[in-house]
Image (cartoon, rainbow, N blue to C red):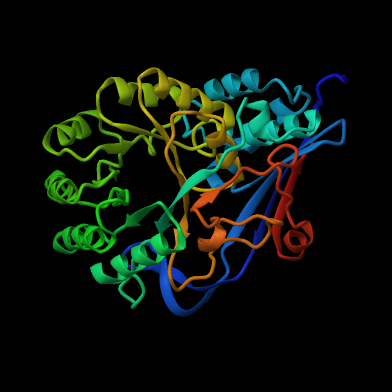
Amino acid sequence: MKDSPIITGIEITRFSYPVENVAVDETYSMPVFTPGAKTNPTATVMQIHTDQGITGEYLGVVEPAATQVKMMASWLIGKPALEREHIYNHMKRALRHFDMTGIGVVDICLWDIAGKYFDAPLYRLLGGKKRPLPAYASTMHPDDNGGLSTPEDMADFAQQCIEMGYPAYKMHVWGNIISREVATVLAVRDRVGEGIPLLLDPGSQYTTFGNAVTVGRACDEANYFWLEDPYRDGGVSHTGHKRLKDLIRTPLLQTEHVRLLEQHVNFITAGATDFVRAGAHEDGGITGAMKIAHAAEGFGLDVELHGPGPVHRHVMTSVRNTNFYELGLVHPSVQTNRPPVYIDYSDDLDAIDSTGNVHAPDGPGIGVDLDWDYIRAHEVDRVLWD
């Protein structure tokens, strides 16, 4: 077998794409259903090129990560692309003053290179066995525009998703009127019945710990599967969430807003979460997400991956201790809010099979091709370090 491919260049491309009926709401500072709106957000792809002509690609780079890649580019060029563990640990030290999201996008591209080099899908390199992945419908942020605007709207959409085959349903909620939050929690349970796992994600919006307790007790009454990031500590307080756990029965899902292995373990050992949240794009890539999954397994806990995407399908396929794939963000009146550049792959509302599952791709590496004709035609800017 040839020697490891050597990194010869790093390229970041930003492109625009049209989205209909979605705009950023001034009240919620989030993209919400907005009838008639036409917007043109941007998305970013990173590529790592090698001397063997193998390129690793990742769609989903955010600005802080791109800036950190720029900081590390001169060090990365010339490194063996298969030395992921060494690169992960060096970048973790070098980026310790920042949020370290740059580690994740580099690591994912390196895993894509490895899969293409060995001609295998990532889940095989990770030791996974192909299996169906149960998905939950994860809603867009609700609105006041006639889309997901009332507890009844949320219940209607829950019923629609369950009838489509989804085995579970997660709500993102408004956060500003606690009586409406409680009513929504109860209305959705009443609509779908007792057999369906329901999940609640306020997105750290509740202004007080007391709000979190109030909604948490409604979740107790309605037998929710988890409550996630409820209040405005930002999802990072060991002490606050340990106290919340002492006051409600509903399991907590935390650690979306802490980074990398060590902070996740700190949260676990503090007794501040029941489920462990991780994301390859946020927590050191596939290398980091697998470290967190195995650490959680050692504590007897499950890891739940944040957000959809082919990378998370590979990771989920490769670990035992996980429950659901997050498919979102979805809305009954929005066909898609994603860039139309994945070929033969979707994470839109209708992406599940008849039993509510999705599957990891089988192509080499990440296993999903990007439509580079579309990306180049809609390119906003591009930078290459070589």
> Is residue 16 or residue 274 the one in the foreground?
274
Residue at point 65%, 63% (across, down): 340
Residue 377's x, y, as percent? 76, 65
> Is residue 105 or residue 384 the one in the foreground?
105
Q: Quadrant of residue 229?
A: top left
Q: Is residue 85 above or below residue 352?
A: above
Residue 347's x, y, as percent? 56, 56
Residue at point 62%, 25% (across, down): 127
Q: Is residue 357 above or below residue 139?
A: above
Residue 105's x, y, as percent? 61, 38
> Is residue 223 or residue 148 the one in the foreground?
223
Residue 259 visible here: yes
Q: Is residue 246 left or right of residue 94?
A: left
Residue at point 63%, 52% (across, down): 44
Q: Is residue 57 left or right of residue 298?
A: right
Residue 374's x, y, as percent? 74, 63
Residue at point 67%, 60% (across, down): 15
Q: Is residue 76 left or right of residue 268?
A: right
